Image (cartoon, grey):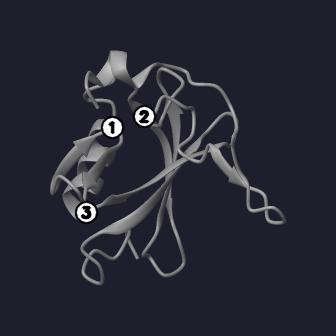
Amino acid sequence: MNGPNFEKHDLIPVIAQDEESGVILMLAYMNEEAYQETLSTKRVCYYSRSRQKLWRKGEESGNVQELKSLYFDCDADTILVKVNQIGGAACHEGYQSCFFRRVDPDSKAVSVEGERVFDPKQVYGKK
């Protein structure tokens, strides 16, 4: 097998992990075009399900992801990218990781972990 099986699924989930720290940064999706662009440019490109188009990570914020390595799982239907996260934040809300909300299993209380790396209002405007 030469790579993920896009014949089985048009969109494949992608886990982005900081290569240096091991922190899971985000989960997104790639179609075959985004996958090929990622490999050819060494900058991670996803497919935005909400916008229905390619999403070049960091095209608005400048917080791009440099591809360091890429793996796919045993079923060829999930991708792991290890990246150098430029700017320190992968999350559009300004956090290092999109997984900054923690749920306590006992109380079910939600807390925020970490500090914002940037103010999204300054980077994205009205969003």
State the residue position of label 3: 31
Is tag 1's residue or tag 2's residue first in the polypeptide sequence? 1
Residue 93 position (above or below residue 62) = below
Are there few (<14), some (14-19), or many (20+) residues within 10 Å of tag 3?
many
Q: Position of residue 7 (x, y in %)?
A: 24, 81
Are there few (<14), some (14-19), or many (20+) residues within 10 Å of tag 2?
many
Q: Is residue 50 left or right of residue 106?
A: left
Q: Is residue 103 left or right of residue 65?
A: right
Q: Position of residue 47 (x, y in %)?
A: 25, 55
State the residue position of label 1: 57
Residue 41 tag number: none
Q: Does the CB distance between marks 1 and 2 fall below 8 Å? A: yes
Residue 5 position (above or below residue 13) = below
State the residue position of label 2: 65
Front-lying residue, 18 or 36:
18
Is tag 2's residue or tag 3's residue first in the polypeptide sequence? 3
Q: Element under label 3?
A: loop
Residue at 24% x, 47% y is: 37
Residue at 32% x, 47% y is: 39
Question: How far separated are the C-alphas under marks 2 and 3?
Answer: 17 Å
Q: Element under label 2?
A: strand
For badge 2, the amino acid type reads Gln
Q: How many labels does the image show?
A: 3
Residue at 54% x, 78% y is: 74
Residue at 29% x, 79% y is: 9
Question: How far separated are the C-alphas under marks 3 and 1?
Answer: 14 Å
Front-lying residue, 49 or 1:
49
Q: Is residue 35 left or right of residue 17?
A: left
Question: Which of the 4 image quadrants contains residue 2?
Answer: bottom left
For badge 3, the amino acid type reads Asn
Front-lying residue, 92 or 54:
92
In the current view of this chain or complex, which residue is farthest to the right?
Answer: 106
